[in-house]
Image (spheres, helix red, strand yellow):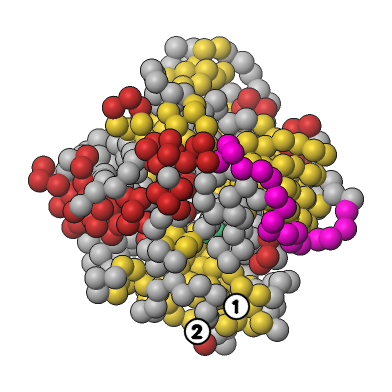
Amino acid sequence: MLLRCVGGLAGITALTPTALLTACKDNAAAGTKREGAGHYGLENGPFDVDIRLRARPDTVPILPGTPSEVWRYTAELRNGPADTITPVGDSYTGPLIRLRRGQRFHARLENSLPEDTTVHWHGLHVPPDVDGQPRLPIKPDEAMTVAFDVRDRAGLYWYHPHPHGPDGGRVGFQSYAGLAGPLVIEDEAERALGLPAGDQEMILVLQDRRFAGDNELTYIGSGMGTMMTRMRGFLGDRILVNGQPDSAREVATRPYRLRILNGSNSRIYKLAWSDGRPMTVLGTDGGLLAAPRQYPFVALAPAQRIDLWVDLSANDPGDELRLLSDSYQAGMMDNMMAGGMMGSGMMGGADLPAGTRVPLLALRVTRRERGKERLPERLAEDLQTPPVERDTPLRRFKLGMVMMRGFAINGRRFEGATVADHEIVPLGHTEVWEFVNDSMMPHPMHVHGLQFAVVGREQIGGRRGWSGLAAGLVDSGLHDTVLVLPGERVRVALTFADFEGLYLYHCHNMEHEDNGMMRYYRVRS
Ligand code: C2O
Ligand code: CU
Ligand code: CU
């Protein structure tokens, strides 16, 4: 039984997660807790926040009818402000962890899964050893403690697993099974802006899923479908918000703040409002912009976050405003897969047909209320982007494929902690990294341990059908993940501050990263 659970990707693709989960459950329950994996990070308390975060199999309602088997995070507050941990929806989504800049954070991470896992704090500027990297796995029935200072700007971040074994990564599978949750950092400057809060602030985790009969979650199909899905990435035919379908909220005639995380394996959303109003963007991965900006729609790639302002004060009770995801004209392979021949569920996820507008969330205006919130003209005074001079060093990373073997960066696939010469960067310095995409697919490129600024985006070839997304790319502000469309060259400026050691950079299409499109880089003094 256990072999089926911990086997390589090849063994697992033939199973639905549910079959796997069922096979693994008893085993997980039978284990005893051991503090096997040690302690990383700050040694000394006192800590302002202390939580226990556990990854475990569970059964939760998702669609009407039979509950679904999932893997999920549950958390318990051991010390700290009472609002540190709050549930997100009532399905599998990990709880919202709310931290304040300057806090000392301590967490006991418990693995009650039948396979190795890690907990990665996506977007946070933390030392390498508490970053949840695959080189420090937590074994089944073991626990690890991590501790760090919360140094990041106010913003929406997230946490998810990051294991990678000899047969490939397990990020796609474990996240898909339900392991992911949002993390918010607050600070004084943001609070002073008086942005919509309380029930006028919504945290929304977008994920697509595919269900078999009896509401079983299905990940990657078998045969031909496996190969195609690995190349393209998993796409589901149901879009869930906070683990639930058909999301709706009752709202008043006031402004709202929608903080959205794309927690999907590979789906890129094209977010728009049903009444055609522009999207008012307050912030990105790394927190607030200097000032609000409007876009006709927002392209949100896996792992990216967007902070939106939407004002319903000109609406009337009875109105309904829907957040939509428009499907777009995609690349050659997408069109091929979306076509009849390959569009069946067996293929492990063809895209939704072109021209569909999928409602993600309905805002139902039920009451008239007058609020005093106004959209601030200026948002962040503390927005510092890494300084780029004429002699700032440039590193180039080519995104592509290795024949028959999957994805690679500069021709090299994931090699564990082995770094090439061009992957060693100097502590305390700023560089420009250039991602060149001459592959057929978009790649949302993510760098661990920091936030970067997008300083250039150029078209060097055809976008191969993905150009429908271009006007919605939000490049201002700070990011930890940037979407590089086919035929594009994107430059980001990053500073390697404070911590030496190994960090990851990779494509955040989870099937790409699991199949080799991930590398370590080393910060060295
Ligand atoms: Cu969301 Cu390597 O991370
Ligand atoms: Cu990350
Ligand atoms: Cu990719």
Q: Position of residue 211 (x, y in %)?
A: 32, 32
Q: Position of residue 498 (x, y in %)?
A: 73, 71
Q: Is residue 309 magenta?
A: no
Q: Report whether residue 43 is seen.
A: yes
Residue drawn 58% across the image and 24% down it = 254
Give the labeled residue for mark 1.
522
Give the labeled residue for mark 2.
420
Circle 1 Cα neighbour tier, 10 Å, few/some/many (<14 / 14–19 / ≥20): many
Residue 34, numbered circle: none
Q: From what the image shows, is residue 454 above or below residue 471? A: below
At label 2, the amino acid type is Ala
Residue drawn 52% across the image and 46% down it = 114
Q: Position of residue 317 (x, y in %)?
A: 49, 12
Label 2 SS: loop
Q: Quadrant of the N terminus?
A: top left
511 or 458, which lies in front? 511
At label 1, the amino acid type is Arg
Q: Quadrant of residue 495?
A: bottom right
Q: From what the image shows, is residue 448 above or below residue 71? A: below
Q: Quadrant of residue 346?
A: top left
